[in-house]
Image (tube, grey):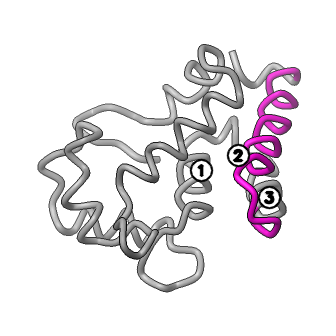
Amino acid sequence: MACHNGVVFEDFFPAMVDKLGAEGFMKELCNGFRLLMDKERGVITFQSLKRNSGLLGLQGMSDEEVRSMIKEGDLNGDGCLNEMEFCTLMFRLSPAMMESSVELLEEAFVAGDHDQIIKAWKSHLVRIGKAGKVN
């Protein structure tokens, strides 16, 4: 569970999905990734997260907090977060939205198509919404 200054991030995801819709929510996650990423490398690095975290209201994160965030989301062990890892990490912060999310994202990323990524997540969010897990 991610917490910073007493704000638990998972509390906001279902409300965001409800307000923005599944497609809008996924676009916002992708926009968040682009805000935090190193523009030259196309991934979120320690340096880019440290430098850009203030854009999301997370200024003042310690080096240890930044390293911990990268480590928690780094699925392939390269010390960075690619877009799939970032989105997966964000979904892991909201257990209600986590079911089958890794598989859906991996399928979409294999195709390398942002529209397909959004479509896969939208399908997932609609399913969990119908199951009563998203308010």
Q: Which residue is mark 3?
A: 108
User: How far is disc 3 from disc 2 in space, using C-alphas?
Assistant: 16 Å
Whether the magenta-drawn stretch holds residue 77 is answered as no
Horizontal relation, residue 115 to residue 84: left or right:
right
Mark 3 burial class by Cα count in 10 Å: few <14, some 14-19, many 20+ = some
Element on which disc 3 rests: helix
Check contact, mark 1 vs mark 2: CB within 8 A: yes
Judge depth for marks 3 and 1 and give the one in front: 3
Residue 92, numbered label: 1
Residue name at image x 70 percent, y 52 percent: 114
In the depicted structure, whether residue 25 falls above or below residue 102: above
Quadrant of the image occupied by residue 24: top right
Element on which disc 2 rests: loop
Given the image, on which type of amino acid does mark 2 rest?
Met
Q: Which residue is mark 2?
A: 98
Quadrant of the drawing holding the C terminus? top right
Horizontal relation, residue 133 to residue 38: left or right:
right
Range of the magenta residues?
Answer: 109-130
Mark 2 burial class by Cα count in 10 Å: few <14, some 14-19, many 20+ = some
Mark 1 burial class by Cα count in 10 Å: few <14, some 14-19, many 20+ = some
Element on which disc 1 rests: helix
Indicate the position of residue 4 as horizontal and vertical percent values: 28, 42
Residues 12 and 37: in front is 37
